[in-house]
Image: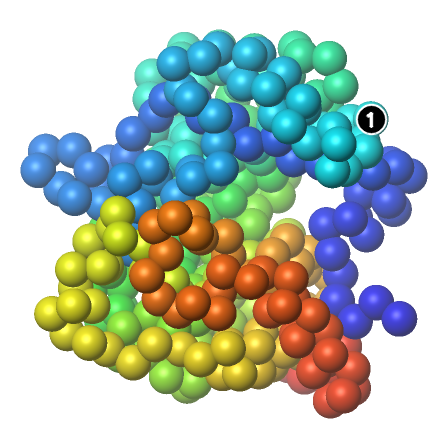
Amino acid sequence: MNRYYTLSDYFKEKYGYKILKLSVNGGFTCPNRINGLKGCLFCSDLGSGEFGEDSSLSIREQIVRQKNFLKHKNKANKYIAYFQSFTNTFDKIENLENKYYEALNCDTIIGLAIATRPDCIDDKVIDLLKEINEKYELWVELGFQTSNAKTANLIRRGYDNSVFIDAVGRLNSAGIKVVSHLIFGLPNENVEDWVNSVDFISKMNLWGVKFHSLYIQKNSDLYKYYLENNFKIISKDEYTDMVCRAISLIPKNYVVHRLTGDADKTQLYLPKWSADKLSVIGLIQKKLKIKNIVQGINYNY
């Protein structure tokens, strides 16, 4: 019994075969890292693209390398090019178009996943994404993390909730699928805050969601902040309980893209349990079964 709707389920329903994502690095930066800004508190110096390729390589070269890296682990005939590092709509529209289509013109690439910020979705970007969406698989991932305005300011997110709402609405109007990221365990937040964030995104017309535990990498400002403030770190039990609860609270049609995050183990400081991704996922699945939770069972329709 599938207790939540996975990306693999979506691909099998729509295409009938296995599809994998290939992380590529477009060489972009972020509006939160220019003019003296230092980026989000938790973001690493690689812009959360620890497992992507070298941006000095062409998009085509990166895709070839990613395919070769994955071929012995997972067999797939088709792929999604995942523009992951930093803000992948933050550039001149001509550069965005060139890099997106360089990926789409590679053999076996059927679409794009584009990670970005809601304050980097303008009319030109919408028009380009709409054009791509007419012929290819496409979704846009927006880093939201929390609905708590105080926390958003602390982590230097750089925009308020209304900007997220507006971006989702505009992408929806263009027929473009939207995925939102949530982090459980941000400094000074508790279960009530986490549930409020889940409720917030559940009221949006999203296509998918990614759940992350907060982890501290030594190459992020969060590491220094923790050493100075020593805030409570979410436990494995707390996190897995919250993900199960979140699954029960989101709409049944939301695609669950991720149950936990991927830290760079060479840079991971805390929590150590987050390094064992398979164990975390296994515990979530075990708890879903024990508690008889299926996606949307507690969603307030």
Which residue is outermost to the bottom?
291
18 left or right, relative to 192: right
Q: Residue 226 in the image: x percent, y percent?
A: 20, 68
Residue, x 37% and y 56% (percent of image)? 268
Q: Quadrant of the C terminus?
A: bottom right
Which residue is outermost to the left?
36
- For the residue pair 90 and 277, the one nearer the viewer reads as 277
Which residue is outermost to the front?
266
Inspect this view and state whether residue 250 appears: no
Q: Which colour scheme appears in the figure?
A: rainbow
Q: Residue 90 in the image: x percent, y percent?
A: 34, 28
Q: Residue 108 in the image: x percent, y percent?
A: 76, 19
Q: Residue 40 in the image: x percent, y percent?
A: 26, 51
- For the residue pair 299 and 7, the one nearer the viewer reads as 7
Residue, x 49% and y 60% (percent of image)? 275
Q: Quadrant of the N terminus?
A: bottom right
Residue 289 to residue 137: above or below = below
Q: Tag 1: residue type?
A: Asn
Residue 90 to residue 251: above or below = above
Inspect this view and state whether residue 149 appears: yes
Q: Which residue is mark 1?
A: 77
202 left or right, relative to 42: right
Residue 195 to residue 18: above or below = below
User: Which element is circle 1 on?
Assistant: loop
Residue 116 to residue 203: above or below = above
**Numbered-mark total:** 1
Image quadrant assignment for residue 155: bottom left
- For the residue pair 173 and 191, the one nearer the viewer reads as 191
- For the residue pair 219 and 77, the one nearer the viewer reads as 219
Residue, x 44% and y 80% (percent of image)? 235
Mark 1 residue crowding within 10 angstroms, few (<14) / some (14–19) / many (20+): few
Residue, x 80% and y 43% (percent of image)? 11
